[in-house]
Amino acid sequence: MTKIIEYSGVKFRVNFCYPKNIKDTKYPCRALVTPLDENERKITKRQLYGKDSDEPVNRFVSGLNPEDIEKNRIPDVINKLLGLMQQRGLYTPSDCGKLSQETDLAVIAKSVKEAFFNKYSAKYKWAQSTCYKYRQQYDYMTEALQGIDYRTLTPDTEILIQENICRAALLDTKKDNEWVPGLTPPASAKTRLYLLYRLLELLRNTEDYDIALTPSRYQGKTSRKKLLLARTDHARNLPSDLLSKLCDTDVLDGQIGILADTGLRINEYGGLLFCSVGYVDGSQGRMYFVRVSGQLSRQNTRTEYPKTDPSYRLIPISQELGERLMAERENLELRYGDISLLLRIGQPEESMYSNAPATVASHMHQLSEQIPQLLRQPEFLEAMRRNRPCTFDKASQDEYLFGMLTPHALRRFFCTWLYTMSGVDTNEIYFFMGHLNKNVRQRSGPCGPTPAEIYRLCLLKHVSPTLFHAAHSLKYNLGKKYRETEVPACSVEFTIPPETSWEIVVEDSEPFNHVTFSGDGIMWKIQYEDEFRLNPNRYALLATEEMYTIQSEGKFLDALKKMAKNEKLNK
C-alpha cells in the first residue's frame, strides 16, 4: 500500500508492507518513508547528504499496522528529515505546522530501535534468542538516556551515562552489589553498555545525527576480592557423595542426576525428547547416551535451534541412569502408547501425556527453584566450605558461593569432572560441553559421530568414576587374540581358557604407577619391563613438551647472557 503524506508543506511517499521475516514480531508492519521535492520527485542522497549517489533517500520504520506507524512512528522520522532538508536548503520552515526536531536521546533511541535491530542482527548474525535478550536490555538502556541532549554529548557526559546504566543494573543483579564508579561494570550492565556503543555508532553513521563524541568503553578495574572470589569459589567442588545420595533417592524424578551426569544447559534439558536417549551394544554390553538436537524456547515449546551450532552433540550417560530412563519410558508407553516424540519435561495426566506450554513452564519453574534449594542445604554448604582451597573473607565467600548454587552449577560440576576424572582428551571436552573449539578444524556439512565413535565415547564414561558408579573394568574373554583395549583403562579383566598361556603387554601412560595382576589359579611373571617413556596419546593429563620448552628468547635475555659471558672473560 502506497500513500502520500504532507507535513509542513513537504510531501512524503510512504510504502507499507508486512515482511515475512518480522511476521511474528511485536511490530509486524513496515513502512518506507521517502521525501519528495516540489515536483514530487524522490530526493536523492546526493541532494540531502552530498554523497556520490543518485539513490533515493529512504527511512524504514516498523509498527503494529499502518495507522500505528502513521500516528506514532512517522512524525519522528519526518522531523529528522526536515531538519536535514533545512540544512541543505531543500526546505524553508513556515510558522504553521512546523515540527521541532527531537533532541532527547531516549526518545531518539526508541524511534530507531527497529532500524537498530534490523541492521545489527543481520551484520553480527545474532540468533533469535540473542535478539530477544538484547531487545529487553535495549529498553533498560534507553531509560538511562532520558533527559540527555544528543547535541551536548561529551566524554564527561558519556561517563555519566555509563555510570547511570551500571547503577540501574545493580537493581536487577543478585550477586554483584558492591559496584562503585571506577570498577569494572557489573555483568548485567555489560550488555547495555555494548548496545549504547552500537546505538551511538548507528546515530552517527546511518541516521546522520551530528554527534561529535566517539564512543569509548567504560574503563574500570576489577577489585582484587572479586577476582579471588571468581577464582576460588566457583561452586565447582560440589560434594560427589551428597550428589550421589540425591541421585539414589530419585529427588525431582532423577532430574538432578541427568543434569549432573550430562552437563546439559537447563533449556537443552527442557528440550529433550523421549527418543533423545539412545543406546549402542558392544564388547562391554549396552551403553547409553543422550543426543542434543534442540532446546526449549522462551514460549516453552521445543525448537530445533540450540544455543550454538556445536550444541548439536552426543553425550554418554552412566549405565544405571540409562537403564532408569529407558524403564521410565517403557512404563509410560504402556499407559499412553508411543511417546518417543514428546518432551520429557512434560507431565502425565489421566488420559494423555501433556506437553502443553503452560505445563512445561510450570515444571521448569519448579525445577529452577527446587534445585538451588537442594544444593544450598546446610550439609552441602558445610562440605564446600571445608574443601575451599583458601579462606580470606569468610562472609563474602559464603555469600558468593550461595549465589553460584543454581542449576548451572551442575553443568560446572560436569565440566570439572571432564577435566579431572574422565580421562578424555582436552579437545573432546569442548564437544561434550557444546562449545566451539577454535583450535580444531571443524567438519564441513552435517556430520555426526559414527557408531564406532559413539561406542568409544560411551566406553570412556564406563571406565571412569561417576555419580552412579565407581570406575568399571574392561572385561574380555580371551578366546581370541586382542591387539589392544578399546580405550585406556586403569583395570582390565580377562577370562582365560584353562591350560593356556598368554602374552599381555601393559603400556603404562603415567609415571610412578604400579601394575599388578590377580586371579584364582593362575601363575604370572614379568618377562620384560621397558623404561618409562612419555605416551604419545593425548589422554594423560600431563603437560606436553611444547608447553614447557622455550621456543624463543628475547633480546633482554640475550643481553644478560652476553654480560655474564663478559664477566667470566674479565675474571
Image (spheres, rainbow, N blue to C red):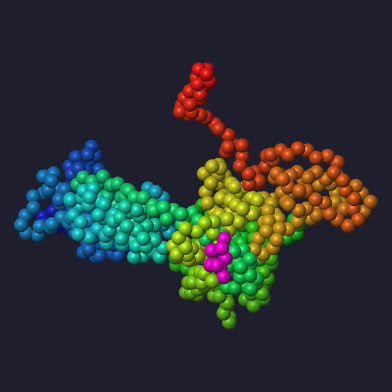
Q: Residue 347 placed where, x, y %?
A: 56, 75
Residue located at (49% from left, 72% from top): 369
Q: Which residues are magenta?
A: 379-387
Residue located at (64% from left, 58% from top): 316
Q: Residue 386 placed where, x, y %?
A: 56, 63
**Residue 248 or 149: which is nearer the viewer?**
248
- Asked whether residue 408 appears in the rendered view, the answer is yes
Q: Residue furthest top?
A: 570
Q: Residue furthest front?
A: 571
Q: Residue furthest bottom?
A: 350
> Is residue 382 within the magenta segment?
yes
> Is residue 487 within the magenta segment?
no
Residue located at (71% from left, 55% from top): 463
- Left or right? Give the position of 114 relative to 229: left
**Residue 567 or 180: which is nearer the viewer?**
567
- Left or right? Give the position of 382 relative to 149: right
- Left or right? Give the position of 315 relative to 67: right
- Asked whether residue 111 appears in the rendered view, the answer is no
Q: Residue furthest right?
A: 499
**Residue 303 or 65: which is nearer the viewer?**
303
Quarter of the figure with the N terminus: bottom left
Q: Residue 348 placed where, x, y %?
A: 58, 77
